[in-house]
Amino acid sequence: MARNSDEAPSATVPDPDEVGARPGARPERRGTTTLAMVASRVGVSLNTVSRALRAPHTVRPELKRRIDQALQDLNYVPNRLAGGLAGTRSDIVGVVITSLFHSEFAAVVDTLQAQLLDRNLQVMLGNSRYDPEEERRLVRSILSWRPAAVAIVGCDHHPEATELLASCGAPIVEMWDVGGDIIDSAVGMDHEAIGRAQAEHLLSRGYRRLAFLGSLREADARARKRASGMAATLAEAGLPPLVRMTRPEGGHPDLGESLLHELLAAHRDVDGIVCNSDAVAFGVLRGLRRVGQNVPGDRGVVGFGDVDAGSCISPTLTSVRPARHAIGRLTAETILARIAGEEPRRITVDWELLERESTAR
Amino acid sequence: MARNSDEAPSATVPDPDEVGARPGARPERRGTTTLAMVASRVGVSLNTVSRALRAPHTVRPELKRRIDQALQDLNYVPNRLAGGLAGTRSDIVGVVITSLFHSEFAAVVDTLQAQLLDRNLQVMLGNSRYDPEEERRLVRSILSWRPAAVAIVGCDHHPEATELLASCGAPIVEMWDVGGDIIDSAVGMDHEAIGRAQAEHLLSRGYRRLAFLGSLREADARARKRASGMAATLAEAGLPPLVRMTRPEGGHPDLGESLLHELLAAHRDVDGIVCNSDAVAFGVLRGLRRVGQNVPGDRGVVGFGDVDAGSCISPTLTSVRPARHAIGRLTAETILARIAGEEPRRITVDWELLERESTAR
DNA sequence: TTGAAAGCGCTACCAG
DNA sequence: CTGGTAGCGCTTTCAA
């Protein structure tokens, strides 16, 4: 059981306002107990209490016990705004992502938050919704809390965001992608390599004419890198160029089905389809089933993200599984290391191409 | 096909100043412009600049222009720790959820964050991972930032968390659930009613012996309320009692398939299966397909959450669609209203039972 | 319309 | 080991 300040059977919470009102004690405000109140109740100085909290071993055990008691009696909750202002660190880690909804990054944030909380770092979250302007706003806003570090999705940001991050003095960890210029540290995947692997896999199964389908809104730098990887692979193999189709709508099965129809109308010869996300791929599979096309016989389909459902649909979906938890964990570790003064890191994280029925011919 | 996981110390990174914090000297924060610096550059006093920021109309237009110029030249980023300490508001909204990974709440947080950011409120996120003890820690931690408001999933918390939230003085909005006691305000669904609807739907399709399957870890108060609703419906119809099966693992298709086998072994007569989440339901469908059972013919399956893939699998999955974005939006509105001094609210949000093939007999 | 001064609650430094 | 004393950067009266 954790020792100080972190336990209180809330059976009876004494009134914090009842403090020996001596000249010298600060005027008490309703509801909030300050260190000074605790100190005056115990009869020691304010900063003794502060030390009892931060460096327990520097306080006489007996005194420490009495202080803990008072802390608990008064139900003290520290004011970290004050702590952050006075100290050097703010204990806030800003986390900027591009999307939460399509759960691309939910698992990453999940792991990251849990690991940071263990070290008493609080996550301040922002979602740019794939909008660079929003990202700029968000970065500004988060930096105004003087975070101890910032984790942000991607390596390609609004120029002012990059500038702000680079010069704010806090460690910055760019997540998900490792390609390109890095501000400080990065933990992510090589998306171009993923695109190559997706294309190579389809080619190895005999598909020859490939397309890349996805939401334009989510056609971020990572998606473009994957598409580039595919295009490069095709070029090297001397095959016809990659067909790319996007729409403004979000990545959803309906988008996938709709893009599929467009694709079949314009490029009937395409036989290998890579989607920007599994959600889109599900729609493509649904569409192909509805028009009586056989998968993997007539056309192969590859997703990205490896959502749970991919192994439950029929045909099961070939997809790329990012090491989401690894990214979250390694990002947390990198943040802690950087805060501790270690060198910047650039970590390339594993991913896996899971070959399932949708390409198994 | 696994890929590289090499770790290369990046050489392209500009090395920050000597981090060697000599004892005695306060660590210098790089690139931090203070209001005072801006003021001295313009040749006015510090709080004139402050006013120019917060109440522009109280400053002579010409001066305002010069101040704005200086603000921009020096690339001023406010320090909201200081602002929060000095002022009465902290502009932080704490958001406590039970899970991010299975994206149950990702959409809610998504919408909530975007709406709050529009009003310059920053989201501080915490994930309790369905653990009351973690929830208590998290609430304490978040309250130590003196948030302007707190949004939290559910109405059933660790007792100390409830106590802390109730007495912290900030508006509290409980999300997702509206049943039971409320601390301040709530925006959510009636989960017992959902359970009743799930059961009634199965009964109306001729299924008679019902079971509830799910992850124990996610068997939170909401899930229990839904199961209760089902049980009550069965009791009122004079049918055999609800079979409940849970396991400690997280809600995943594999869990669903595994629970299904257990169910078939122990209660062969069950013909209507309600799952705690769509992910579990997907596994149940997969399992039934593998053992050659016909859905919806032999058994009906109902999910919860209405994940995208539900309409792409075969058979398509009957599920309950929570009004996720509505919850996010209404929570934001309630928070803003409460901060503005309006009365607490209790809002019951719609949901929809989507009848698809998995129960269509 | 502007400025001076007093804190917000805490941490950090120094002397006892 | 303990207490005094400065601030951290900003908001807020209250004067000018």
Image (cartoon, coloured by chain):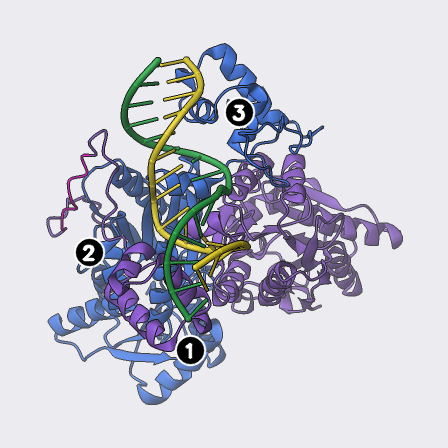
Chain colours: A blue, B purple, C green, D yellow
Magenta span includes A138 = no
Residue under mark 1: which chain is it in?
A
Labels 3 and 2 touching (C-beta < 8 A): no
Residue marked by disc 3? A39
Q: As drawn, which residue projects farthest toward the bottom? A: A265
Which is more foreground, mark 1 or mark 2? 2
Question: At 30% from the left edge and 43% from the top edge, which residue is drawn?
Answer: A335
Indicate whether residue B15 is drawn in magenta.
yes
Identify the mark nearer the N-term, 3 or 1: 3
Q: Which residues are magenta?
A: B14-20
Q: Is residue A357 visible?
A: no
Query: Residue A315 at what x, y percent from top left?
Result: 44, 64
Residue indicated by mark 1: A293
In this rendering, which labeled residue sits more in front, label 3 or label 1? 3
Quadrant hosting residue B243: top right
- Dominant secondary structure (helix, strand or loop) of the stretch shown in magenta: loop
